[in-house]
Image (cartoon, helix red, strand yellow):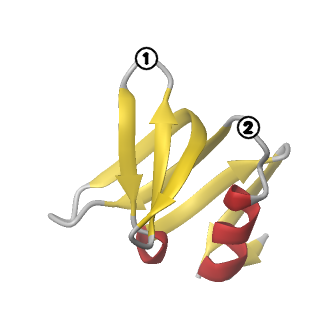
Amino acid sequence: MIISKKKATNLILDSKGRYFSVTSKKLNGEIRDFKSAKLNDLLYGNLNIIEKGVGYRNVKPENILSLRINKQVYQIR
């Protein structure tokens, strides 16, 4: 299913502590998968997530490419 970046951000914000996976593009153009992640906070417009076994990471909502949450896989346009 294809959704907007705003809808993807809202799904993450409404995750209520549940785990999700997100694929995004880093500032240097590298593609990064965040697996078993939980939302920590929204900081300066970025999603601050906790990746299990790795630690805290910041994701820019405009760089999200795909999202797996609530047993659904979404492609982001």
Q: Residues within 10 Å of mark 2 (few under 14, many from 20)?
A: few
Q: Secondary structure at mark 2?
A: loop
Q: Residue at x 77, y 49 (%)?
A: 15
Residue 24 picture location, percent across and down: 42, 59
Is 36 located above or below residue 62 in the figure? above
Q: Is residue 42 left or right of residue 54?
A: right
Q: Is residue 30 left or right of residue 25?
A: left
Taking the view exactly as shown, the residue that stands out farthest to the right is: 71
Q: Residues within 10 Å of mark 1 (few under 14, many from 20)?
A: few
Q: Residue at x 63, y 56 (%)?
A: 67
CB-based contact (under 8 Å), mark 1 and mark 2? no
Q: Earlier in the sequence, mark 1 or mark 2?
A: 2
Indicate which disc residue 17 carries. 2
**Residue 25 falls in which quadrant of the image?**
bottom left
The amino acid beneath tag 2 is Gly
- Residue picked out by circle 1: 53
**Residue 31 falls in which quadrant of the image?**
bottom left
Is 27 located above or below residue 5 in the figure? above
Q: How many marks?
A: 2
Q: Residue at x 85, y 43 (%)?
A: 71
Indicate which disc residue 44 carries. none
72, 55: nearer the viewer:
55
Between the C-alphas of marks 1 and 2, the distance is: 16 Å
The amino acid beneath tag 1 is Gly
Q: Nearer the viewer, mark 1 or mark 2?
A: 2
Is 28 located above or below residue 7 in the figure? above
7, 2: nearer the viewer:
7
44, 32: nearer the viewer:
44
Residue 1 picture location, percent across and down: 79, 69
Residue 74 picture location, percent across and down: 71, 63
Q: Residue at x 23, y 57 (%)?
A: 30
Image quadrant holding the C terminus, namely bottom right
